[in-house]
Image (cartoon, grey):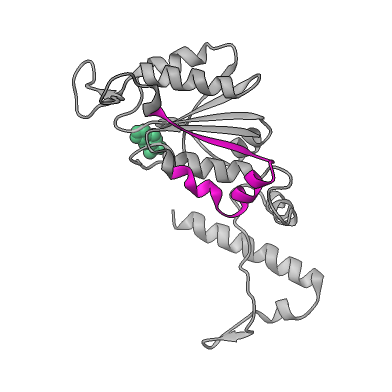
Amino acid sequence: MKITAISIFPEYFAATKLSLIGKAIDSKLIEFAPIDLREFTHDNHKTVDDTPYGGGAGMVMKPEPWGEAIDSSLNRHDGIVDLIILTPAGRTFNQELANKFAQRENLIFACGRYEGIDARVADFYRGHQRVRLHEISIGNYVLNGGEVAALVMIEAITRLIPGVIGNPDSLLEESHNEIGEVEYPVYTKPAEWRGLQVPEVLKSGNHGEISNWRRSEAKRRSNSLRESE
Ligand code: JDN
């Protein structure tokens, strides 16, 4: 999978060098390129924002640098590209979307700042031959920009690519759980810690009973989570 992330703060994406994603990049399973939006400005101040037409608070990202940065990024990719614009007004990201994007070969993340990107950028690429456009939010809260949201998506998506996760059993176990059902509680040594015991059934060696106990604990947890919403 080839991934490009466009931002005025490409340094955010240094986090992709760490842990499993970093290893997947080293092993060529994933190719990742952070792109600095300001490289696609042409004035001395490298201006990326301007005041909103119609008035109002804050600044809006100018369309020209975005158009040039996205066109240049499209040239790094072959064939059809999924262009993901992060915006609080987008469709909420979830595991189903992660599964879908994990099957794709080319992802470009457009990370805006300020009050967002001039709406004509999305309109233009919605009609582009090589682009499938997605406007995505990671949840119902407001961030200062799309970078952290893109990192969340990159982690959720790339861990589903075969070979990225060391132990694919953990993926299998997750897919057995219904959506919305959290996993069972986990324990390791020591058997007693600060007066708290590991449940006896987990030390019994009875795999049938262990499996039943885990299923019922998972159900109990997801029920009490829903009640606390
Ligand atoms: O998902 B977010 O809260 C988000 C906020 C901003 C953004 C993109 C995403 N661009 C500017 C603010």
| x then y, percent, for residue 91 | 48, 31
Name the quadrant containing residue 161: top right
Q: For this view, does 37 lie left or right of residue 166?
A: left
Residue found at x 50% / y 17%: 71
Whether residue 138 is visible = no
| x then y, percent, for residue 212 | 74, 66
Residue found at x 80% / y 78%: 205
**Region rendered in magenta:** 12-37
User: How many numbered discs?
Assistant: 0
Please tell me whether residue 119 belongs to the stretch shown in magenta.
no
Residue found at x 37% / y 43%: 141
* Ligand 1 lies in quarter: top left
Please tell me whether residue 36 belongs to the stretch shown in magenta.
yes
Q: Quadrant of the N terminus?
A: top right
Q: For this view, does 62 lie left or right of residue 186?
A: left
Residue found at x 69% / y 52%: 165
In the image, farthest residue toward the front: 44
Q: Nearer the viewer, residue 87 or 204?
A: 87
